[in-house]
Image: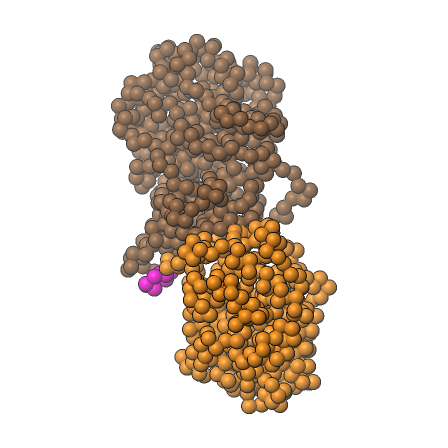
Chain colours: A brown, B orange
Amino acid sequence: MTGIVSYGAYVPPTRLAFATLGGRPAQDGGPEKAVAWNDEDAVTMAVTAAVNCLRGFDREQVDAVMFACTTYPFGEKQGAALLARALDLPRAVRSADFSGSLRAGTNALRAAVDAVRAGSARHVLVVASDCRTGPPGSSLEMNFGDAAVAFLVGDSDPIASVDESFAVADEIVDVWRKAGDVFVHSWEERFVVQEGYTPNLVEGVKGLLEQAGASASDFAKIMLYAPNARSHGAVVRELGLEADQVQDPLFGRLGNTGCSFALVQLAAALENAKSGDRLLVASYGDGAEAVALKVTDHVEKLESRRGVSWHLDRRRGVKSYDQYLKARNLNTTEYEVPDDQGLSATIHFRERDADISFVGHKCNACGAVQFPQQRVCETCFSKDDFTRHRLSDKIGKVLTYTFDFFFPTPAPPTVVTICEIGGARVHIQLVNIEPADVKLDMPVEFEFRRIHNSGSRPNYYWKATPFLAG
Amino acid sequence: MRTDAIRDKVAIVGVGCCQFGENWDQSPSDMIVDAAYEAYSDAGIEKPQQQIDAVFCGSLYSQKGPHECSDALKLWKPITEVSNYCATGTDAFRCGVMSVACGLYDTVLIVGYDKPKDRGVSGPSVMMTQVRDLPQTPAGWFSICASRYFEKYGASRDDLALIAIKNHHNGTLAPNSFLKREITLEDYKKARIISWPFGLYDCAAQTDGAAAAIITRTEIAKDFRQDPVLVKGITVFGGPNPQKDPHMDFLAWKPTIEASKVVYEMAGVGPGDIDVAQLHDCFSLTEMLSYEDLGFCQKGEAKDYMADGYFELSGKLPVNTDGGLKSFGHPTGATGVRMIYENTLQLQGRADKRQVEGAEIALSHNIGGHPTACGIAILGKA
C-alpha cells in the first residue's frame, strides 16, 4: 500500500504581529504571521522540516528527494540536491525540483506516489517550502506566512494511504512573480477570487469526489489552500462543508505559506487523525489539484514528532517592523553592497561535507570526534584513519560564548559559541535565544541556516539552537 | 634544542619608532623611513648601505613587505619577509637574531610595519570568506575565554576595566603613542560593547605604524654605542586552534604557556626576574590571562594582583609602560618591534616619565592567530 509513512514540519519561531505591521503595539494573542528571519529561507526551512520527518527513519533508505518551492534562490542549480547533501543522504539518490506554481507541493506529492506505485522508488522524501514576500504595506504582506513541510512516501505500512487524485490546469494571470521579482504581484482581488481561485478549487475538489464516487461528507478533514481567510470561507460555503470537517487554515497564526500551505494543513491534520479517517487536500495555482487519503492504524505507531502544532507553540515576537524589513533585506540603501565573487566555488565544493552535511569524523585509532575533517588526528596524531561522523543530528553543549555586535544582522548581538558535540569542538552561532538566557553547558541542537550572502548568493551552514523536548 | 645557543650573542644597538596613528598622509615607505632612520641615528650608523648586511621585515597586511622596505631605504641587501599573525614583529626580530647568532651577518636591520588604515574600515573587518568560524572578528575569537574564566575565578568586566584605565594612562606618557587620553571607570562602563565582554576600551586601537631595530654581534656592539642591550632569549611557539582543540579549558592560552617555558630557559631567568614587561593587550582579557600564563602570578590570581596595582607604572612589575596595543596602537607587523623599542629604552634608562627605575630584565610578548602562536623576547642590560 502506497502512502505517507512519516511527516515533519517547520515554522519559523519569529512572528510578526499584524499590529506591528500597522505600527501599533502588539497585544498578546493578537493576529500574527510566521516570518523566516534573515538567516532562513525556503531551503533552510525545508531542511529542518525534512530532519523532523526523518526522525526515527534510516536516511540510507531514502532513494528520491522531491523539493517543491517557488522561492528557491537559484534559477539554475537544484534545490533537491542541496537538501540531499544537507540531510547527508546517499549519493545515489534521485532528486527533482518542482516549481513555477503554488501547486508545486501537491505536484511533488503526486509524483512521489506515482514513482512508488510504479516501483521506481521505495521511499521518496517530499519537501514543500516557500518564503514569499508581499510588497511592504500590502494585504499580501499581511496574509503571507513562511513554513515548510515534509512527507516520507513509501510502499508499505503508511500512516495514510493515498487513494485518489485529480487535477485541472488553467491559464490565468491572477497572481504571479516574474524571474527576478522580489514581490508577489496580483491582479484586482475580486477577479482573482471570482475567476481564478474559487472556480478552480471547487472544480478540483468536485472532480476528485466524482472520480472517487464519494461526497464531501465522507471526509473527516478537508485541507484547502486559500489566499486569505475570506476566500477560504467562501469555498467552504460553496462546497457545503461542516465546520468540524474543515482543517484550521491558521490565518492570523501562520499565514498563507505558498506551495507548502495545503500540505502544512495536511501535516497538522495527521497529528490528530484516527485510523479510518478520510482526508482531502486541495491546492490552487494555474489550476487546482486534489488528493484523497485514508488514515491507517499505523498512525498510532508513529512516534510523536515535530509537526505544525509543536512549532506554533514555539514563538518569539518581532520587536519592530524595521527589524522585519532588515531581516528580509527590504530596507533601502543608497549604494548596493559591492558585488564580489563571494566564497570560492572550489572551496565550497571541497568543504560540502563539513558545511552542508555538518559531518566531521571519528578517529579509528583513538575514537576522538573532530570537526571539520582533518588529515592528522588532533588527539593521537594518527594520519588518514577516520570514519565519517554526522554532527547535525546530535545534541551538543555550549562550552563558551560571546555576544558579537559587529556581525551584520538585523538585531545585534549575534551569540557565538564554541559547542562540544560528542567530543568535537565547533565554533558556531546560537540562535532562538536572548543573550541573558545563554548559559554555560546548556544543551543545544542544530539547524541548517543561511550564514551570509557573500557573492550575492545564499551561503549555508548550521547553527545551534537551544535543545527542546519533543 | 640547545637552549643557550643564542643567549647574549646578539646585541641591540639602535631602535626607532614612527608616530603610530591614523597616518592618512603617510605611505608605508614614509613610516619605514621614519623608524629606520631613527634607529640608524640611535646606533650611530651614517652609511647604512655599507653598515647593514641584511634586512628582515615583518608585515601582515602588505603583500610586498621586504620589497617596500628595501625600496624605501635603498638597501639592496638580502631581504626576508616574515608573517606570523600578531607575533609577526617578534618573529621578524627572532629571524634577524638567529642570522646574527649563527655568524652569517654582522649587522641586521629589522623593520616591522603595517598600514591597516588604507582599507576603509574602522577596526578589523568582519571576514566573509568562509561559512565556518564566523564571525571572524578578533574580538569574537579572543573573547571565548571570558565566560569560563569569569565563572571559575569570579572575575568580571570591573577587573578588565583596570587594564584599560592603566594602559590609557601609560599611553599619555609615550611621545609616539596614538591615544593620549585618560579614561575613567565611568567612560569604560558607558562604552558600547563590541563582543561581550569586550567594550570599546577593551579593544586595542588598530593603527598604522612602523618600528625598527638594529642588532649586531655582541663583541662589536660597543662600536655602535656604549649601552647595548642583549638578547637573552627569544622564541615563537604554535599551539592548537582553541576553537576546535578538544582539550581547551578556556582559562589560559596554551601558546603563551609553552613559549614561556622555553624562553625562560633560553634566557636563564624566571618570571620573578622580570622588571618590566610589554604584553599583548589586543584585548584587556588577553593581558589579564598573560599575567598568569607567563607565571607572573598563579592562575586565577590576576585580579587580586591588579587590584593591588602590581602591574601599574608604580607597581612591582609595570606592564605596557608605553600604553600597549590599547593606546600606543596596533599596526600588526610593527607591534612586536615596537615592544623591543620600548624595552630597549627602559633598559637604557631612556623612558622618561614612564621609566621603570633600575630595570635590568625586560620581557615582550605577542600572541596571534585564533590565537595559535605566541612570540616572547627577553632582553637584558649588557
Tell me if residue B47 comes above or below residue A194 in the rendering: below
Q: Residue at x 62, y 88 (%)?
A: B226
Residue B245 shows in this picture: no
Residue bounds of the magenta highlight: A374-381
- Which percent across, then down, holds residue A451? 50, 45
Tell me if residue B229 comes above or below residue A182 in the rendering: below
Tell me if residue A197 comes above or below residue B287 in the rendering: above
- Which percent across, then down, holds residue B314? 57, 70
Residue at far right of view: B25
**Image quadrant containing the N terminus of chain B:** bottom left
Q: Residue at x 51, y 58 (%)?
A: B159
Magenta stretch containing residue A378, yes or no? yes
Along the viewing direction, whichever of B241 and A192 lies nearer the viewer: B241
Classify residue B200 by image quadrant. bottom right
- Horizontally, is A81 left or right of A342 in the view? left
- Which percent across, then down, holds residue A195? 55, 15
Q: Residue at x 51, y 85 (%)?
A: B9
Residue A193 shows in this picture: yes
Magenta-highlighted stretch: main secondary structure? loop
Along the viewing direction, whichever of A153 and A392 lies nearer the viewer: A392
Along the viewing direction, whichever of B239 and A297 lies nearer the viewer: B239
- Which percent across, then down, holds residue A13? 47, 34
Magenta stretch containing residue A416, yes or no? no
Tell me if residue A368 comes above or below residue A356 in the rendering: below
